[in-house]
């Protein structure tokens, strides 16, 4: 079943239908040649930001940015991570996890009231973003791997209970019908994406896990690993564990942070107070 077919099937009001779609999505084939890794160098980070800029430009989500790369001050916060999907040395996709912090979440730019009223624990809340996939790899299972990877990372390595994501309104149904997200409030026009209508979606880890356990095995309480196996993502969990053992996350230096800001034409006055504070921590280190 293609991503397009999945987007047109299922119903947010029918959880069993969502599970069926999710199980079909989980069976999508993905090549072993694709490796997902967190950014470990400034060059890796720049490559990811260039990739995102090119993809968003082609989709009409942004206009041409200085330096031909996206500027995201959220990555100055230590807990936040950008991951790259690679084939050999070529980056073919990106995805990120942004934890709730002093900078807040990117979605709070237009959905601040909805997130504030959500009742989520800030220390266990995060947003998924910075997604792009090369056109030549769409429909090949890379989307499934990237989302499974970032959700597993969020749950097992960052202890996240609630995940938010903001997507174009027309794409929201896919996340509701396949990935157990639910829309929060009404869609709004997003200035960050050339005023495209954007939906805020939310997924809660514990209720979703409880639902999966009940649906997949009504008479026996499944272990988390058994749930992962049923969803066809246990192999990704083991790959993630091994990868995180051997990888060191990129750590900003003052020189690199200034270089990134200069490349993107960013001045102090361009940033808000919380973003300036995060940048200043790096510059003072």
Image (tube, rainbow, N blue to C red):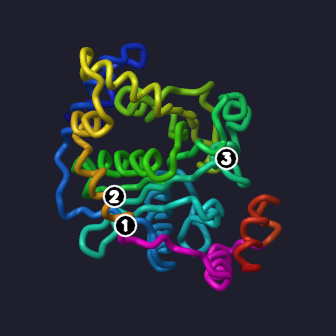
**Crowd around label 3: few <14 · some 14–19 · many ≥20 (10 Å):** some
Quick one: label 3 or label 1, which is nearer the N terminus?
Answer: 3
Look at the image and tell me in which quarter the C terminus lies. bottom right
Which region is colored magenta?
A: 245-267
Q: Tell me, yes or no, whether the highlighted magenta stretch contains residue 263.
A: yes
Q: Secondary structure at mark 1?
A: helix
* Residue 20 picture quarter: top left
Query: Residue, x 72% and y 38% (percent of image)?
Result: 112
Apparent side of residue 256 relative to residue 33 in the rendered image (left or right): right
Please name the residue that numbered disc 1 is placed on.
Answer: 245
Tag 1–tag 2 contact (CB < 8 Å)? yes
Query: Residue, x 54% and y 71% (percent of image)?
Result: 68
Quick one: label 2 or label 3, which is nearer the N terminus?
Answer: 3
**Residue 45, horizontal then vertical, whole percent:** 49, 72
Q: What is the total number of numbered labels drawn onto the structure image?
A: 3
| Mark in the foreground, 3 or 1 | 1
- The span from disc 3 to disc 1 (Cα, nearest Å) is 39 Å
Foreground residue among 149 and 240:
240
- The span from disc 2 to disc 3 (Cα, nearest Å) is 37 Å
Q: Secondary structure at mark 2?
A: helix
Q: Secondary structure at mark 3?
A: helix
- The span from disc 1 to disc 2 (Cα, nearest Å) is 6 Å
Foreground residue among 22 and 167:
22
Please name the residue that numbered disc 2 is placed on.
Answer: 241
* Residue 195 picture quarter: top right
């Amino acid at each position: 079943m293609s991503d397009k077919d999945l987007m047109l099937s299922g119903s947010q009001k029918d959880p069993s239908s969502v599970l069926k779609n999710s199980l079909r999505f989980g069976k999508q084939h993905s090549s072993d040649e694709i490796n997902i890794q967190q950014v470990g160098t400034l060059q890796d980070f720049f490559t990811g930001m260039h990739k995102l800029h090119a993809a968003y430009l082609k989709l009409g989500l942004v206009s041409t940015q200085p330096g031909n790369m996206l500027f995201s001050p959220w990555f100055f916060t230590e807990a936040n991570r950008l991951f790259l999907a690679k084939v050999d040395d070529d980056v073919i996709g990106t995805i990120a996890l942004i934890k709730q912090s002093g900078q807040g979440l990117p979605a709070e730019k237009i959905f601040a009231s909805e997130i504030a009223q959500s009742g989520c624990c800030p220390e266990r809340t995060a947003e998924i973003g910075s997604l792009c996939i090369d056109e030549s790899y769409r429909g090949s299972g890379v989307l499934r791997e990237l989302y499974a990877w970032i959700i597993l990372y969020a749950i097992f390595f960052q202890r996240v209970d609630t995940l938010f994501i903001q997507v174009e309104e027309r794409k929201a149904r896919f996340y509701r019908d396949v990935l157990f997200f639910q829309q929060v409030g009404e869609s709004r026009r997003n200035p960050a994406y050339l005023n495209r209508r954007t939906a805020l979606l939310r997924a809660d880890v514990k209720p979703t896990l409880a639902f999966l356990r009940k649906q997949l095995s009504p008479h026996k309480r499944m272990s988390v690993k058994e749930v992962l196996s049923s969803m066809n993502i246990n192999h990704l969990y083991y790959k993630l564990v091994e990868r995180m053992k051997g990888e060191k996350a990129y750590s900003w230096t003052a020189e690199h942070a200034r270089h990134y800001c200069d490349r993107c034409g960013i001045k102090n006055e361009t940033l808000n107070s919380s973003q300036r504070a995060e940048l200043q921590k790096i510059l003072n280190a």
